[in-house]
Image: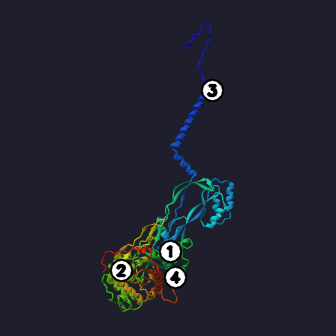
Amino acid sequence: MTNSRRQVPTAGEIVHYRQPRKLDSQAVRMLAVLLILILIAGVAIFRLVCIQMFRHGLYKSISDSIHLEVLDMPASRGQILDCRFRPLAGSSETLSFWACSHGLTKSEKSLAKKKLAGFADVPQDKVEEAFGERPRFISLRRFCDEDTALRIQRLNVPGIGSSVEHLRYYTSDCASNIIGFVNAQGEALEGAERYYDGLLSGAPGKLVVNPYVRLQGAPLIQEILKQPTDGHNVVLTIDNTIQFILSEHLRDACEKWNSPLALGVIMDPKTGAILGMSSYPSYSSASYGESYKAQMSKEEVPNYLRDLLEPGGLYKARCLTDLFEPGSLFKIFIVAAALDMNVIRPYEKFFCENGSFRVGRSVISDWRPFGELTVEEILIRSSNIGMSKIGMRLTSTLMHQYLMKFGLLEKPGLGLFAEPVPGLRDLSQWDQEYTCFVSFGQGVAISALALVSAVSAIANDGILMRPYILAAVQSSDGTIIHQTDPTVIRRVIKTSTARTMTAMMHNVVMQGGARVASIPGVAVCGKTGTAQVFDHETGTYSHEDLITSFIGFAPAEDPQVAILISVFSPKHEQREIWGSTVAAPIFSAVAGHVLAYLGSRSRPYLNMANNNDPAEDRS
């Protein structure tokens, strides 16, 4: 059995004891290095853990900002449709090409420049910029047609990619003043395109690409952050066929009468819907940059219309933006107000002073001397003196109240363009002289749309409807998400007054100088107007520049359309310039064509709603 206790050495036995070894300097250094390496490794591991677990997002965002690009995915812009759902403006998918020379060798850049040299559809300065020393995304060619896109693709140029973009197109030049346009950068600048941009534009998506990693020459799509949302479709009350009829007749009028400007508005008097609204000369939404001002000389355009020659002068919807003195067509509103207040009777006679009547410092004249005329005859003969006496009997206060009720002193409020406030003195500044002037349409400036809206109230049994141009809004899949219902503003005159005025205005056409406004088989109601243009430089009315107009509605028994036609500064060597000779025949042609068109088709989409009469006395 082994004794675990230590044996005591015997005498003479040699015993070797191990002494503790001392570390030399080399071993100390090695140990120190080892400890330092362990410390460094620990710090590195700790740092790596911190980066990976706690600061991963920060460093990823830094990396992404260096290596990734966030691009917009364009949404498809909604269509603009007429009231029968025919497209007036839309968008089509096209290819746009860009260059990104990140990661290309010098030889590849040289090859790209060589292949694109002399290629007419791609500007050479952009080629040099795209494949230069500082590579970045460069747009080479946007909105390519199919032929151009195929030719660029066949070149197989390194560093070139393509993306789908939506190109705006327009189908109706006759409606350009209403539609407006979108520029190459996708900015809506005029008309319905601008006013309804929030509905039409939709929302773009977001796309992440890595320009350093390529698949078939294009950057690798890393992630789609957000899908685009297509815009809504906007349905207008405009009927494109009616718009075309109106525009063609305005163009013919300008050519026949050497006029620098003609305009017209067509409204459904029962709803307030605008079926047509145009001015000539106009422009093309599809080529807005080439047709932004009238192609006339300064000698052909009077001073008050010189903005036609300015850049963008044709972009205006002048039926909304331009104010002008209406002249004698204004008389129907004053007579309607006087009849409604029972201050005159239809067959009451007024002495018209044989053609000359002094009021204050002014002498009011008629176009020919008249003696006694009934109220209806005053309208038929268009006597300024007779109207002055009716206006004085009505009084300035009541006249102002009724002009307000007719909406003639308010902005129509469509919003498509900046609408100026109608020009009229403050009531506190009215005197008897000014009251007489207003009674025959002088000294007051009104827009074409406001005038048509007011005459529609007479056609609609005395009820004023709110003018509107937005019929409905569709989602991108065609679902109606909003429909505009006709809105009653107020009752302006009694039903009996409106029907009396309708009969009088029909007799104006049948018995007066406006016979040329008649339509075979259709009872037409209307009134001519011939207004002198006020010259602000001289402070007097021009004897050369006239504004000739006709306003009316038809058929008398069931009005379908209310129309205003105005021709500015017409000139003719052989014919007299009056509203009856210039504007009335245009009214007849336009109204005849429009009524025939409406009669052969179902009523426009927007006319389905019935207007509700306010609960007021209709007696």
Compare marks 3 and 2 and give the one earlier in the sequence.
Answer: 3
The kind of residue on which mark 1 rests is Ala
Mark 3–mark 2 Cα distance, whole angstroms, equals 117 Å
Is residue 550 among the parts visible in the rendering?
Answer: yes
Which mark is nearer the camera, 2 or 4? 2
The kind of residue on which mark 3 rests is Gln
Q: Which residue is mark 2?
A: 461
Is residue 325 among the parts visible in the rendering?
Answer: no
Q: The N terminus appears in which quarter of the rendering?
A: top right
Compare marks 2 and 1 and give the one earlier in the sequence.
Answer: 1
Does 349 sit left or right of 543 as displayed? left
Compare marks 2 and 4 and give the one earlier in the sequence.
Answer: 4
In the image, which disc is placed on residue 378? Answer: none
Mark 2–mark 4 Cα distance, whole angstroms, equals 34 Å
Compare marks 4 and 3 and give the one earlier in the sequence.
Answer: 3
SS assignment at label 3: helix
Which mark is nearer the camera, 4 or 1? 1
Compare marks 4 and 1 and give the one earlier in the sequence.
Answer: 1
The x, y position of residue 573, in whole percent, is: 52, 88
Mark 4–mark 1 Cα distance, whole angstroms, equals 18 Å
Q: Which residue is mark 1?
A: 175
In the image, which disc is placed on residue 254? Answer: 4
Q: Give the residue at the far top of this rendering.
A: 11
User: Toward the viewer: 213 or 263?
Assistant: 213
Q: Which residue is mark 3?
A: 26
Which mark is nearer the camera, 3 or 2? 2
